[in-house]
Amino acid sequence: MDTSVLLLQLEALKFRLDLLEKENAVLKERLSKYEPPKTSRNSSVAPSKDEHRPKPNQSLCKSSGKKPGGQLGHKGKTLEMTSTPDHIIELHPSHCYKCGSSLEAIPGKEVSSGQVLDIPPIKAVFIEYRSYSKSCSCGCQNKGAFPEAVTTPVSYGPNIESLVGYFHARQSSLRQNERGF
């Protein structure tokens, strides 16, 4: 082929390429109107870069103008000490903090006290059911029936099952409250 023919074909192909690129740009622009914008939910965009992200929750309460915290003249509330504690633990120093001398023989004077309110530790109770077999005079073997809660050699009782159910439901509701639901 002649080089002039090849040059003409090359120019025609360049012109055709320019037309197709312009048409492609127009079609992409039209298509972008129908596609949802990229967000952190549908792409790898960071949540902080979302265009229409919700604003942080703002309080609906009106400002009183007072500083936060306890106000002057307000009587505070605290746990009351009991006059009949279940256990009393006396804390006597055994030696001098400065020189190290023994203080065992010296009588002490009570200077302060503090109380801790707590519940006793929960201890699992194992109940063993023993089924006995008895023979009747008619020749029938009779076996003691287990309660409904005994389904396997070791199983959980109704109190544990209800406690686990309560904690599961309560924990779920706490998680939902943390998320703002």
Image (cartoon, grey):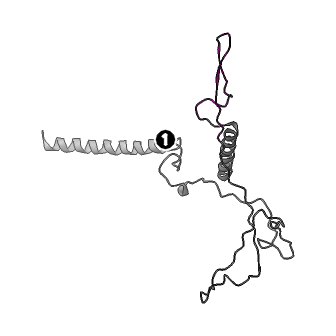
Q: Position of residue 66 (x, y in %)?
A: 80, 73
Foreground of the two, 41 or 74 = 74
Q: From the viewer's perspective, tell me whether residue 118 is left or right of residue 49.
A: right
Give the quadrant of residue 138: top right
76 in relation to 180, above or below: below
Q: Residue at x 64, y 30 (%)?
A: 130
Which residue position is annotated with label 1? 31
52 in relation to 85, above or below: above
Query: Under tag 1, what secondary structure?
Result: helix
Foreground of the two, 68 or 28 = 68
118 in relation to 115, above or below: above
Query: What segment carries the magenta color?
Result: 126-154
Check the image and name the residue furthest to the front.
137
Q: Residue 143 in magenta?
A: yes
Check the image and name the residue furthest to the left.
1
Give the quadrant of residue 55: bottom right
Q: Where is residue 157 in the image (x, y as percent from the top left)?
A: 67, 37
Q: Residue at x 48, y 48 (%)?
A: 43
Q: From the viewer's perspective, tell me whether residue 181 is left or right of residue 69.
A: left
In which quadrant will I find the N terminus? top left
Q: Residue at x 77, y 71 (%)?
A: 69
Foreground of the two, 28 or 16 = 28
Total number of numbered labels? 1
Q: Residue 63 in magenta?
A: no
Q: Where is residue 22 in the image (x, y as percent from the top left)?
A: 39, 45
